[in-house]
Amino acid sequence: MLSCSINTLKGLYDISGVEVGQHFYWQIGGFQVHGQVLITSWVVIAILLGSATIAVRNPQTIPTGSQNFFEYVLEFIRDVSKTQIGEEYGPWVPFIGTMFLFIFVSNWSGALLPWKIIQLPHGELAAPTNDINTTVALALLTSVAYFYAGLTKKGLSYFGKYIQPTPILLPINILEDFTKPLSLSFRLFGNILADELVVVVLVSLVPSVVPIPVMFLGLFTSGIQALIFATLAAAYIGESMEGHH
Amino acid sequence: MKNVTDSFLSLGHWPSAGSFGFNTDILATNPINLSVVIGVLIFFGKGVLSDLLDNRKQRILNTIRNSEELRGGAIEQLEKARARLRKVEMEADQFRVNGYSEIEREKWNLINSTSKTLEQLENYKNETIQFEQQRAINQVRQRVFQQALQGALGTLNSCLNNELHLRTISANIGMLGAMKEITD
């Protein structure tokens, strides 16, 4: 009787098990990479490049349909860059745009596309930004970008900003260079992974109607997170480029 | 209880881990919820998005049309201004041509009238000079006569006495008698 119920309980545990942290490892060179993240990243890249290529075929003066939509997105990104960076925002629009679009499309594809239909030997397909490696990579790219911006604009006097406004704040300014990528990466990672987990848990508990509001909330917050990441990246770049010039 | 849990078990039986494949468990892959979410998103999003994009397209159309109109208006005004310029230039040429002859004529008119006036003034001057001369001469004559008469009167008065008076009267009577004899 006891072993029977234990077996039943084990069976129940098998159904309601939620797996996180299992990765689909590939061996490339000497590294183990998370294959599922690469697969979903490729899908996101294919969606972005494919839709962009299709939309800008045959451009008209009066835009219609998808050309109009992409132009609108471009105007939006330009507006964000211009607000944050200031006058010399031109060269940075592609970078900010890539950040925003990649994060946005990967978040929404993770929430909307039925990834769970495809089953992998280990782990599962989901948004590529639910992996800390992806978000840390994006955050480090942003760090490199704002360092590059500051150094090309001001030369070595860029490092003078560490003792602004007073030299007492030097340790804090140095610390800021580490916390900026840290906060960027963890904010995005935490939001996306947590939303995914909530949805998966709710689905495994009450499959049919209850997860829907949470899924909408997830769409909303993941969109906001993409915008926040892009805006902060632009703000850091603008901050390191501003000055007495 | 066992039957219920058994049915749950049979639902949750998926292929063993370690292989690729398709998960056909609709409770795990969540297609219903996904389709509901996607449906609602498309339903509302389509309206909002098409509104946004239509506004954008209208704005672009209007801007292009406005700038075309402005351009047309500016070209028209340029043409008008050019036509006016040509007309004014022609008139200016006319004026220049006419003006020079006018100027010449006016100049000659002025010269003529001025010389006429000058002549007249010359005449007046000469007349006045002559008149003044005459007057001076008359005055002098008058004075001379006056002086002469005064002198004569004075001489007469100084040497006039009864005897001379008598002799003069008798001489005059004799002359008168002689003239009367001649005329008879």
Image: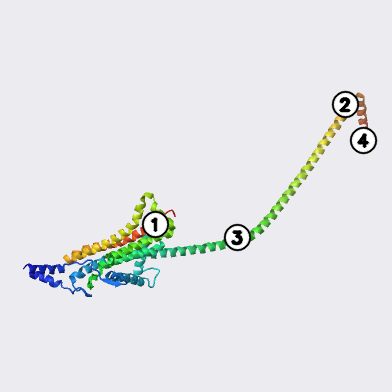
State the image coordinates of residue A12 (x, y, percent, origin top left).
13, 68
Depth-wise, is mark 2 or mark 1 nearer the camera?
1
Residue B46 appears in view: no
SS assignment at label 4:
helix
Q: Is residue A196 left or right of residue B85?
A: left
**Number of numbered discs on residues:** 4
Q: Distance between the residues labelled 2 and 1?
A: 140 Å
Residue ID for mark 1: A240
- Asked whether the beta carbons under mark 3 and mark 4 sit within 8 Å of each other, the answer is no
Mark 2 near mark 1, Cβ–Cβ under 8 Å? no
Q: Mark 4 points at which residue?
A: B179
| Residue A44 at x, y percent in the picture | 30, 69
Q: For label 2, count other residues whose C-alpha is less than 10 Å away and answer few (under 14), some (14-19) or many (20+).
A: few
**In front: mark 3 or mark 1?**
1
Task: Tell me the element at label 2.
Answer: helix
**Residue at (41% x, 55% y) in the render:** A159
- Say which label, 3 or 4, has the lower sequence index: 3
As shown in the figure, which amino acid type bears the numbered disc 2? Asn
Name the disc covering residue B92, or none: 3
